[in-house]
Image (spheres, coloured by chain):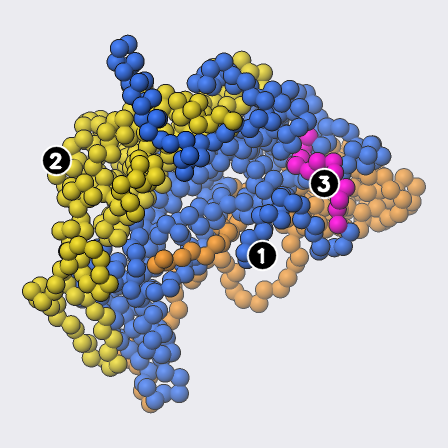
Amino acid sequence: MPVKGIAKTALSRNGVSSYVLPCHRVVLQYCNWGGSSQGIRDLLKSGQLDTIARQRESVVFEIARRSGHPKLSFKFAHDKSKEVNIANLDKSEIVRKLQDNIQSSGSELFKWNHKVMSSNESVRGIWSPLHVSNENRFKI
Amino acid sequence: MLQAMKEIRAIGSVCQRITPASFYHVSRPDASLKTTYDSIKDYGSYKNNIFTHRLPESTAEQSPLLVALHSRLSLPKSYSLSTLSQALNLIKFEGLANNFGLNTLGKTLLSYYVSENLLIRYPRLPMPVHNLAIDAYMGVNTLYDIGKSWGIEVDTTTKLEKHLSQEPEFMRYGKLRFLDESAKKSESKEPGVFELTQEELSSVKNDNTYLSREAEAYASAVRSIIGGLYTHEGEEATKSFIHSHILSRKLPLDQMFQFSKPTRELVRLAEKLQFSEPVEIRLIAETGRLSSHAMYVAGAFCGTDKLGEGIGSSLQEAKTRAVVNALMSYYLYSPVSQDGSPVKLPSDNDYKFEGIVGGGDVAI
Amino acid sequence: MNVRKIAFSGHNVVRRFTTSPLAQIYLHKGSRIPGLKKDPEEVFTSYKGQKYGISEENLGHIKKFLNDKYKISDDLILQILTHKSFGNGIKPYNEKLSAMGSKILNLFCAKHVIEQPTNNENAISGKNFDSLGSPMSKELSGRMSLGLFAQLNKLNTVMFWKSYNHELSFEASGEMKVSAQMVYALIGAVTFVHGKRVAEEFIREKLFNSNTSIEDITSEVVQKYGSN
């Protein structure tokens, strides 16, 4: 065989031609008794959650009643998940946390100390000292 | 009429020429489907009696998972939730119609549009790389990845667990169903340790990789969703869905080549292309033999045309890189149309053939 | 034939090997001897004695089959007729064409099968999926049906290919497979030149609505060899 192939998978580029929201499920956990759940109880009573759910049709909203501090857990694509503690937060702060995290990709935050992060190679190519014309070369 | 009779007799005689103990395996019907039909060519009359019904639309509408998935993929209104639910069902023996047909249709659609794209855009890809490139776009692992990114969930709980947690029945219709009751129970307790089923064990390849049933199921669901789109919206919509979700991914084609004898291959290729002058490797530049880390730039030439160039820390390395570079720039050629845009695909509306047809690889 | 050599000079000097005169090369005829170059006359002749090249006797029958509506260039027709096994793959062959053809034929058959009128209650928006996995629908674009189709229409009278044993039967020698691949390539070439819509018309007209309909051939094959 002259040439063989190496198996690879095509890389995902969410947002190129199509965009699928990575967050697909939110679980709002609250306690019916504890004081730290006051904010989320207010939110649930106000009916504002219905409006949010209608705006975010592609996310499943699940409401769970469990004892303990309230929290939001988000499920993202590729089995990633995130839990946000909302104990003692008021209604508007919870809504902000909810909206912020629904828009997240679910990946861990990290520091990138370079100017560009790309899956494409540089358009310019790499400078090569060996391709400089003879008269401009560095001479010892 | 007489002509037709004659033809049929001719067919009969042709068939007789093939011995029953033939190498070609004519596909056999799957008896478990209990298929009945009026006549073999009346495709409308085929019925798999194992499937008694489809999910009613009213039940599907109650499943928040289906509604959310429908919206996440921005599927058109005409795409019914019951079809979406059927696309997620791989179970054969529950009476509910499964996704077999949708999967088959989705696969045919995908393989046409993916191949068409590769054949037109990269006409000179060697066949082994071409086939792997198709796999890279629509192989099980890629479709598994796509299924995961669409947020499809698997139905892993048993009937008992569902009963205990008071989960409504319609919830499961929005999940990927491929495990039967016994498979759901035998989950391994150790994290990171998986018990393979008999099927999975048989799929273990030499390089110790295997396709898990979950990966296959996800892939089948993705294909079925594409098949469903064709059923409700027709081919144009399906084509644009495939282009935006599958062909928009980045294919690392330049990393998919493995050469064993590049120089011989280039020489054979030059012979196939009937180059008038022999292929030569020439040294273009060097840092000097006695420099502490000598570097060489070599080029593969045919007469005065430079076919490729490579840089290396030995003459041999530079030569090989030059030859590989020449081969890669030949194989990865992509034609452009007169106005500079990529050439049109045969399925495009005002198609005009502007590219080339690959002439095949060389043997060495 | 030129003697080709790779020269790699150690210095910046270019050493070029001038092409040797033809007279010095011995071209061998008959069975293969390692190290000897074979006579192209002999290599590029099919086992039936047809000489490779564009000529009316090689391409005429395909041109007639395609008629003006699906006309394609002579070079492409020759490529359709050339299989990978011919002349060690040095001439352009039909692998890429048949890759295109088999995919479009599969798609056409799948669409054709599900779009027949049905009263199956499990059909989705009038499309009956129960027929899709059946042997009939699978074999419709299968190699045996297409091989027989090529034979009935005498499309495979001229083909440039090489079997390990041409004496064997239609199927065992590989002729069936090569003929089927040639028909795929024919469909593929029409797709390349005229686009998908025309290629689908071509399949409908030539394969389905002809005297030797692919459906008749397939049903015959399936009923004969596909039953349990």
Classify mark 2: helix, strand or loop: helix
Q: Label 3: state its secondary structure.
A: helix
Q: Are marks 3 and 2 on the same chain?
A: no
Question: Disc 2 and disc 1: Cα gap in Å?
Answer: 54 Å
Q: Amino acid at mark 1?
A: Asn
Chain in blue on the image? B
Q: Chain of mark 3?
A: B
Callout 3, which amino acid?
A: Ala
Crowd class of label 1 (few under 14; some 14 to 19; many from 20; radius 10 Å): few
Find residue C56 and name its label: 2
Which disc number belongs to residue B208? 1
Residue C180 percent across, percent down from the top left = 33, 35
Q: Residue at x 34, y 26 (%)?
A: B16
**Residue B167: x, y in percent?**
79, 32
Density class for disc 2 (Cα within 10 Å; few <14, some 14-19, many ≥20) is few
Q: Quadrant of residue C195?
A: top left
Q: Secondary structure at mark 1?
A: loop
Q: Which residue is mark 3?
A: B183
Residue nearer the viewer, B248 or C124 = C124
Give left or right: position of A14 versus C109. right
Q: Quadrant of residue B351?
A: top left
Is residue C99 on the magenta stretch? no
The tint chain A carries is orange
Of C67 and A19, which appears nearest the observer?
Answer: C67
For marks 1 and 3, the one nearer the N-term is 3
Q: Which chain is yellow?
A: C
Q: Which mark is residue C112?
A: none
Seen at 57% across and 26% down, the residue is: B31
The stretch of residues the image draws in magenta is B173-188
Residue in the foreground of this view, choosing between B271 and C195? B271
